[in-house]
Amino acid sequence: MLRRLGVLDWIRVGLLALGLLFVATGLLPLAEATASLTEIGPLLVFLVGVIVLAELTKEAQVFDAIAARMAVLGRGNYFALFLLCTVFASFITIFLNLDTTAVLLTPVMLALAPKARIAALPLAMTTIWFANTASLLFPVSNLTNLLAMHRIELSPLEFASFMWAPQTVAIAVTMAFLWAYFWRRGRRRDLRYTPPLLEPIADRALFTAASAACVLFIVALLARVEVWAAATAAGLVVVVAFAVRDRKRLTWRLVPWQLLIFVTGLFLVVPTLSRYGLDDLMHWMLGDERDPYRTAAVGAGLANVVNNLPAYKALEGVIPAGDRGQLFALLVGTNVGTVVTPWASLATLLWFESCRRHDVRVPMRRFLLTGAGLAVTGVLATTWALVAFG
């Protein structure tokens, strides 16, 4: 098993080991470590539930069926397909988390490309950009949102009432950049694409159960059920269906252990560093004015340097309790701004790996430059929407 661990896996294991070392040496008091881990208990339950739900939903061919029918519905028109891809990627991100979009939707979209004779890069870029920029609306959309929930103290619908305008603007700006740099005819060259042939569903019962589980999850969120409970209930529905119909698919590999140890290690390491000077540095970076534009810019910049989860956690600690405006601005930066470097978000790292496995070449210079333009424009426009409508 140790031989199968990749570089990212070793980093996650190392982060957890470092956190445990801090606790063992007393650099992080046991009481503080316990409080920090208690805080993320529901988050870890949610992670397991939503990843299992998403993985088994993909195995049931739900995503494949939607993608194929989406391409057929576009009838060879690239602009129609572009709009449908926007809706699909945004919907999956908003309701099933950005990592689901990066891990599970990317292979589906890349597999669709040769069937419809479509260039793979526009589909791939649509997936990863919307995985990041469409992750503002609900707490479940991004781990940073979930981390913020204990400070914001809002229900999912109340959270969305603050974020609907920023999310709309973020999606609109992303659409403009995608069309200009990847989808317009000057970039793709072809006038039309060939709609693929629809393939039959292998197991209708599993397909129906997985679809129903996803609907249950969304309805539960709208009904203000706790996110961890909603994910657990929906996950159990699809697990039971697979236990009855295709038990061999239920393996321990469904459990996202990499995410679990990464988040656990993060919640041990960052509190320790905050005790020894990190808070002072973060306070200096944000300033005393509580300016939302500066907060969003610092969040985006730091996320592209060290990754959005540690960036959010480090900056959150110096934002005064009850200051929802600045916390929302930080979420804008650490969600919308994470499209420049390959390591800015875990979703982007997973997406690059998926592209590599499918032999899709991502021109790094183009990725960095277009991402920088989207990050600057998107963060500014989205922060404006937050200030104007929040």
Image (cartoon, rainbow, N blue to C red):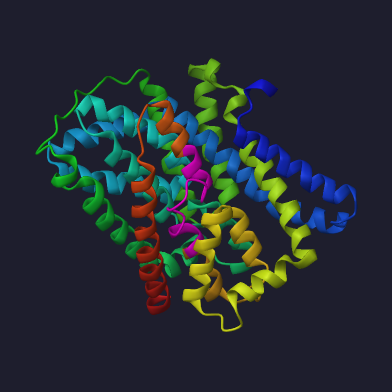
Locate the C terminus by quadrant. bottom left
The verdict on residue 342 being magenta is yes
Indicate left or right for 135 with 26 as reference: left
The answer to whether residue 1 of the structure is visible from this angle is no
Viewer-nearest residue: 106 or 40: 106
Please state the total of marks drawn on the protein image. Answer: 0
Indicate left or right for 190 with 212 as reference: left
Q: Is residue 168 above or below residue 200?
A: below
- Residue at left 59%, top 62%? 148
The x and y percentages for residue 355 are 40, 33
Q: Is residue 325 above or below residue 359?
A: below
The x and y percentages for residue 280 are 71, 72
Specify the quadrant of the image occupied by residue 88: top left
- Residue at left 38%, top 62%? 167
Q: Is residue 172 above or below residue 244?
A: below
- Residue at left 51%, top 22%? 242
The verdict on residue 222 being magenta is no
The span picked out in magenta is 333-350
- Residue at left 47%, top 33%? 353
The x and y percentages for residue 367 are 37, 47
What is the residue that sits farthest to the left in this orientation? 191
Locate the N terminus by quadrant. top right
What is the residue that sits farthest to the right in this orientation? 25
Indicate left or right for 294 with 263 as reference: left
